[in-house]
Amino acid sequence: MANKDILLVDDDPDIRESLRIILENEGYTVRMAANGKQAEQALLSKKPDLMILDVMMSTDTEGFDLAFKLRSQPEYENMPIVLLTSFLDKVREEGPDQFQHILGEQWPAKWLFEKPVDSKRLIKKITGILEGA
Amino acid sequence: MNSDADKTPRKRIVFKELQKRTVWFIRLRWWVSPVIAAGAVSAYIAGFEFNLLMVLLVAGFILLYNFVFRLALSALSGRGVDRERSVQRFTICQVGFDYAAVFLLIHYSGGASSPLVFFFIFHIIFASILLPVVLAYVFAGLSSLGLSIMAVLEYDGILARHPVLFLGDSIESAGSPSHMFVRLFFFTASVFIAAFSTTEIMRMLRMRILALDRSNTAVSILNEKLNALYHMIQAVGSKQKLNQVLGPVCNNLVRVVDTRALSVKLLSESRELLKYAAACNLPDSLVLKNSIVLKKSPLNRRIIEGEPFVTGDISQQEMFQFGEDLEAAGFKSVLFVPLKVEGRVIGILGGYSRQANRFTSEDVGFFQQAADLVAMAIENARAYENIEKLMQERTRFMLQVAHNLKAPLDGAVSILNLIQEGYLGDLKKEQSEYLTRVSNRAGSMRSMITELLTLARSRSDGHKIEKKSIDLKKLLDRIERTFRVEAGQKGLTFMVDCPYDIPAVSGDWDMLEQMMENLVSNAIKYTPKGSVWVDASIWNEDRVRIMVADTGIGITQQDMPGLFSDFFRAGNAKTIDEIGTGLGLAIVRETVEKHMGSIKVDSEPDRGSVFTVYLPIEVKMEREDENSCNAKNQN
């Protein structure tokens, strides 16, 4: 479980900070980026085991755009991405299936959390993903 | 008055009469032979001596040619070629044969002194009614001439005489040539007087018919115009968008004014250009040239400068900027009238005709009336557009505010959660309690922002609800599951009643679910004890009725009017829950409106409320779009 590397991308410093504390508390190594560009640079220096990615940053779909870009590259194709968003009308327990119509056929990530994030659920999910992997 | 235009309806009326009378003539003639035969036989029995055999033969002759005419008529009506002339020729032929028959009868019943000569008068009357005036006089002359010739020939013995005797006495009274001459003179006078008076009466009658026909046409044109004005007023009153108004207005105008094409041109802000706002039957090339420069189009400029109307001839190319295009499209004359709002000219209503000098002063008057309507429509539409713009601005503002509020709140809540969950060290019990209170307030602020976002999104311009077939049974089952626990914890009886075969409605699942959630959560929240129930059923065959009823605190009469407004909270609701958002019912109303439904509320304070939503049942059939004249619209 330890020494897993998580890249956390969010433009809001408070959210970055609070998630970092929560994740580090679980023993993960957390690297942070405030936008898509910084995230890509961080990816180049080292491929993380998991990426947490905010959808709306400088543009409404910056997170989606980055996720789609990574999905199309074989190197990152299987890297787990957890999306964060503030602005979906509703997030249901059924998960991201509900929101397929926003993006059409494809969905760039398997997991989606609404902000502010329920830390217990997030940890549970991330642990599940990284241990299963 | 234009004689050319006048002649055609007159001819038409005469011809119609002739056609009708021809049949009547033949039918009448069937009686002539039997009457002659019966008369002749009775006279013979009564003791008159005359050539009975010849008279009967003439009667037979009449019967024979009438039979031929009857056959000819059937053949004629089958052929469409040059009908007017053939019908007239046919009539002349009939009259000719009749003349021959009458001459024969007269000859065999005493010649020029025969009592039957008066039969000619009838013939002259018929001819005067049915044939052109000249022919009536020709027939009068022929009868007079024919009789004179017969008299002379019989007097000279060239033609055999067939005198009529009664009891051995000749009934002939004209023994001498002078007597005969006087007789013939008066006979001639009688037939001509008959021809004159009958044709005069007919002429007057025909003029009356013509006048009637003309006023009939005028009335129906007027009626059409009134109808068109009515339709235009209806369009102006019932539609708010400019392109929805101008289309029907142009279509109606083009129909009644009987012009080839129409245009509505609007003045640009600089008042130097005219742009086509709508056009009907104008060539695309012209409309798509997008603007007319006033300086280059003297005719348009005159209207903008204040002339009440101008008519123009396309041949005067210097008057138009795009005269060549108009000429190429076959237009010959135009009529322009100003569109005025509060005395200011804002554009031009134009009519285009393929006739030269088509537009009369009557057209000008009607065009001006129509222009007033079009101007009113434009004014309405502009006012509506401004309101729409303001509403959209308000919505954008709401969206922006909601977005901007949510981001810092999320940050704050994240940190708050961090502290509450002990990541930054253990908390004292009291600290924890106060943080929970902060967290609760932040939570309600969040839900208010979320509702504001929902409302703003659904009101924003680009928002179109994605219509899908919604299974109400499934939706209401979900509602039942969502609220079962909450209602149970409050000790309320909670029931959802929906038949399995409830028809589907067409709509957006998320919006409809949100609507039901808002209604049911309100009902549960504002019902301290008793029950909440939801009932869905078919209503009036084409709607579904969903009722959400409770035994709660109810709504006072004075709170009713504002119930569905943004941020409205009823007085008694505040006593139950301090921190409602006042947006729940606004979202309900928005959803109902977006789904073409309606909602009503019945309530009695302290007894309960019933919210009833009516939604149209999904229509499976695809409707065809109405196809109208190619009224174009360019912004």
Image: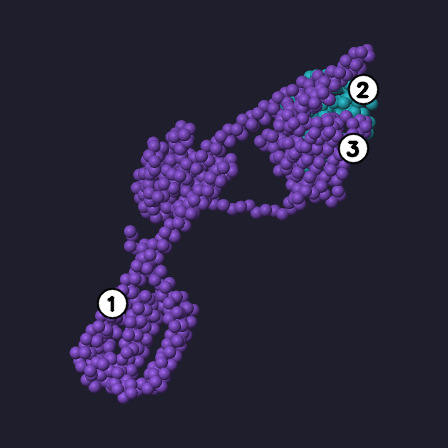
Q: For marks 3 and 2, give the one nearer the viewer.
A: 3
Q: Residue at x 54, y 26 (%)?
A: B390
Residue type, label 2 = Glu
Q: Amino acid at mark 1?
A: Ile
Work out whether residue B418 can be spotted. Answer: no
Of marks 1 and 3, the one in the foreground: 1
Apparent side of residue B6 relative to residue B175 in the rendered image (left or right): right
Q: Nearer the viewer, residue B571 or A76?
A: B571
- Residue at image position (24%, 77%) is B147
**Circle 3 residues within 10 Å: few <14, some 14–19, many ≥20:** many
Q: Are marks 3 and 2 on the same chain?
A: no
Residue B231 place in picture, x, y as percent: 47, 43
Quarter assignment of residue B93: bottom left
Secondary structure of the residue carrying numbered label 1: helix
Residue drawn at x 28%, y 62% is B200
Q: What is the distance, in whole Å, between disc 3 and disc 2 at their CAs?
A: 43 Å
Q: On screen, B543 above or below B555? A: below
The chain displayed purple equals: B
Label whose residue precedes the other's in the sequence (1 or 3): 1
Q: Which chain is cyan?
A: A
Residue bearing the label numbered 3: B494
Q: Are marks 3 and 2 in contact (CB under 8 Å)?
A: no
The residue labelled by disc 1 is B193
Whether B427 is drawn above or below B159: the answer is: above
The residue furthest bottom is B168
